[in-house]
Image: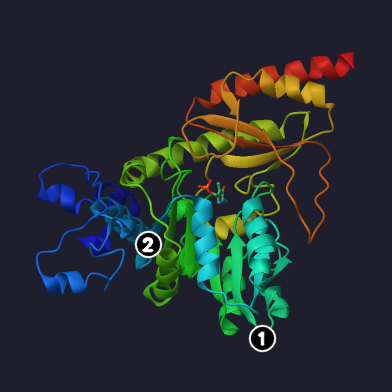
């Protein structure tokens, strides 16, 4: 049965063993610090398989184990670990594979706090970071030094949505003995198959589409067995743990992730296509648009798109932009994404390899589960407000 389960079926059925045993549907929230043992032998062996066996509350309870098991299997990895945020998952994953004196390669379009971690914490620990252009592909080989331990990709890139050739990057990285980490938050395990594309460690800000309702912070990292030990060692030494209530929200979100993502894909693309035709728009940064420079790679490696993309407007005075955005009824201005509602932000992505000089303001849109016709009408009214102010200026 298991071998033939598709990801949709897995989403509905994995991680429910404890629930089924108790004749209910959802794995309950197990609150615990102390885990008791019936024998001395069990007590003295409690740390044999942390994050799988019941050892101590910090290492999880059946609620977190259920989410770990489900996520690992859906993504095609062996093990998963939970973190109090996506950023915590990133920090632990990188730290697990570096030592003082090492060098790492990180894509220039990485989530900005990840860059901050590399430039700040890693520099302090004596680990050097070199950033690479998102289009580097197998050319990454030229940047690999004898002390390079890790290659970090994030595809599509934060705010600018470049698709990276992960199979080519991974092939070169593996030849040089480097481990490949990927921030797979945008695509989720449903739309990018990390482990079949050469990734060794797949990182998720589960805060976004896994939780899916903008009401919890959560990180998940999925690995194969061979990379689990260093990750587990850092995770336990740093004392990372996740509240069972938040693990429960992650599990609950997983159940509907596939249907939500299908709708995000459809709605996002409909809005992106409409935006492309607007005179106020310079370009739409959405890899699923046929005219996008990253479309071919996206089509080759991804099986869907989520609801998050960028749009570069033609130059417009700030008050006119503010009038457009602040008057939107269906969009809130706010960070994070992956919930059921639409969001808009302005973005100023830091880039050090290839200059980012957009023609006008860069907006990031998260298209939620509302009717796309309503979203488009909201944006259209926004452009009218913008144009009115622009004409008056
Ligand atoms: C939001 C985000 C993160 C960080 O996740 P948090 O749960 O907010 O800490 C990491 N990577 C990407 C691509 C993100 O969008």
The residue sitting at 28% across, 71% down in the picture is: 49
Where disc 2 sits, the SS reads strand
Residue 335 vs 381, above or below: the answer is: below
Estimate the x, y position of residue 257 in percent, counting from the top left. Answer: 39, 43
* Residue closest to the far bottom: 146
On residue 387, which mark appears?
Answer: none
The residue sitting at 34% across, 54% down in the picture is: 7
Where disc 1 sits, the SS reads loop
Residue 367 vs 111, above or below: the answer is: above
Which color mode does the image show? rainbow
Estimate the x, y position of residue 54 in percent, counting from the top left. Answer: 23, 62
315 to the left or right of 259: right
The Cα–Cα distance between marks 2 and 1, rounded to whole angstroms, is 30 Å
Q: Nearer the viewer, residue 220 or 285?
A: 220
Q: Nearer the viewer, residue 255 or 60?
A: 60
The residue sitting at 51% across, 40% down in the picture is: 265
Estimate the x, y position of residue 184 in percent, counting from the top left. Answer: 51, 56
Residue for badge 2: 80
Residue 220 vs 312, above or below: the answer is: below
Sequence-wise first label, 2 or 1: 2
The residue sitting at 81% across, 14% down in the picture is: 388
Residue 140 vs 324, above or below: the answer is: below
Q: Mark 1: few, some, or many residues within 10 Å (few <14, many ≥20)?
A: few
Q: Quadrant of residue 215?
A: top left
Residue for badge 1: 146
Q: Quadrant of residue 234?
A: bottom left
**How many marks do you count on the picture?**
2
Q: Nearer the viewer, residue 168 or 338?
A: 338
Report whether the residue tagged 1 is closer than 8 Å to ligand 1: no
| On-image quarter of the C terminus | top right
Q: Mark 2: few, some, or many residues within 10 Å (few <14, many ≥20)?
A: many
């Amino acid at each position: 049965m298991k071998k033939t389960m598709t990801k949709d079926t897995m989403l509905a059925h994995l991680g429910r063993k404890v629930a089924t045993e108790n004749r209910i549907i959802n794995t309950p929230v197990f609150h615990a610090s102390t885990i008791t043992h019936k024998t001395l032998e069990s007590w003295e062996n409690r740390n044999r398989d942390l994050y799988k066996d019941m050892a101590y509350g910090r290492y999880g309870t059946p609620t977190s184990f259920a989410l770990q098991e489900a996520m690992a299997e859906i993504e095609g990895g062996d093990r998963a670990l939970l973190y109090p945020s996506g950023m915590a998952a990133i920090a632990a994953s990188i730290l697990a594979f570096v030592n003082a004196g090492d060098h790492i390669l990180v894509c220039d379009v990485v989530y900005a706090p990840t860059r901050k971690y590399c430039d700040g914490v890693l520099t302090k620990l004596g680990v050097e970071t070199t950033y690479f252009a998102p289009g580097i592909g197998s050319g990454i080989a030229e940047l690999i030094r004898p002390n390079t331990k890790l290659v970090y990709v994030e595809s599509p890139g934060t705010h600018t949505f470049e698709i990276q050739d992960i199979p080519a990057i991974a092939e070169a990285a593996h030849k040089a003995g480097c481990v490949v980490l990927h921030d797979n938050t945008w695509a989720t395990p449903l739309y990018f198959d990390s482990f079949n594309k050469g990734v060794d460690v797949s990182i998720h800000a589960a805060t976004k589409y896994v939780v899916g309702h903008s009401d919890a912070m959560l990180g998940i990292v999925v690995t194969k067995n061979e990379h689990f030990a260093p990750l587990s060692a850092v995770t336990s030494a740093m004392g990372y743990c996740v509240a069972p209530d938040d693990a429960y929200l992650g599990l609950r979100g997983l159940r509907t992730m596939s249907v939500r993502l299908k709708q995000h894909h459809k709605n996002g693309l409909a809005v992106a296509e409409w935006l492309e035709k607007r005179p106020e728009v310079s370009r739409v940064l959405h890899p699923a648009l046929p005219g996008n420079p990253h479309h071919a790679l996206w089509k080759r490696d991804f099986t869907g798109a989520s609801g998050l993309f960028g749009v570069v407007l033609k130059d417009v005075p700030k008050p006119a932009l503010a009038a457009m955005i602040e008057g939107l009824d269906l969009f809130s201005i706010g960070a994070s994404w992956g919930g059921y509602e639409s969001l808009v932000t302005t973005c100023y992505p830091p880039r050090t390899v290839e200059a980012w000089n957009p023609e006008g303001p860069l907006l990031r849109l998260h298209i939620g589960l509302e009717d796309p016709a309503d979203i488009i009408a909201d944006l259209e009214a926004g452009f009218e407000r913008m144009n009115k102010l622009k004409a008056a200026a």
